[in-house]
Image (cartoon, grey):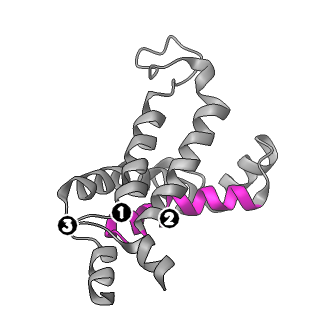
Amino acid sequence: MKYVQSILATSNSVAPLIARLTLAIVIFPHGAQKLLGWFGGYGFSGTMGYFTDSLGIPAILAFLVIIAESLGAVALFAGALTRISAFGIGITMTVAMFMGHTANGFFMNWYGNQAGEGFEYHLLTIGLALIGVVSGGGALSVDKAISKSAD
């Protein structure tokens, strides 16, 4: 029980709230593309096929990426299991950064003159995820409500 309480523990600070809401809002559309096919995405089977066949990612890891970006973003928005959700998103963004974006440099491809997107977006999402991992959900989080009732 002590382990669960340490995962849920958080302050009533607004800073982690802002970080988790921002990260959830930015990541959810990417997860919805992968899981549901929204926003021009390929949905679950299309994404699984691309990750496993084209990128050579093991199926279990491809599945975890889809879950981290979709259900993880929803959980993060609610502040439910914030540390776990933020960790999953942070790992996903770190792997994406090193697998496909560091070779393109730092900057986003605003003008279409690079081979692909740089890694600045990934770095920002990793920073926001680290706030969630370190601080928990903060104010107005399910984690705060549960940990308060467990006290």
> Which residue sits at x=30%, y=87%?
151
Above-or-below relation of 33 to 122: below
Name which of mark 2 and mark 1 comes first in the sequence: 2
Residue 35 seen anywhere in this rendered image of the structure: yes
SS class, disc 3: loop
Please name the amino acid that badge 2 sits on: Ile
Q: Which residue is mark 3?
A: 12
Q: Which residue is mark 1?
A: 136
Residue 37 seen anywhere in this rendered image of the structure: no
| Most distant residue in the front direction | 2
Q: Is residue 17 magenta?
A: no
Q: Which residue is mark 2?
A: 84
Q: Distance of mark 2 from mark 1, alpha carbons? A: 9 Å
Viewer-proximal residue among 50 and 81: 81
Task: Give the side of residue 9 with respect to residue 12, left or right.
Answer: right
Please name the amino acid that badge 3 sits on: Asn
Please name the amino acid that badge 1 sits on: Gly
Q: Is residue 63 magenta?
A: yes
Q: Residues within 10 Å of mark 3 (few under 14, many from 20)?
A: some
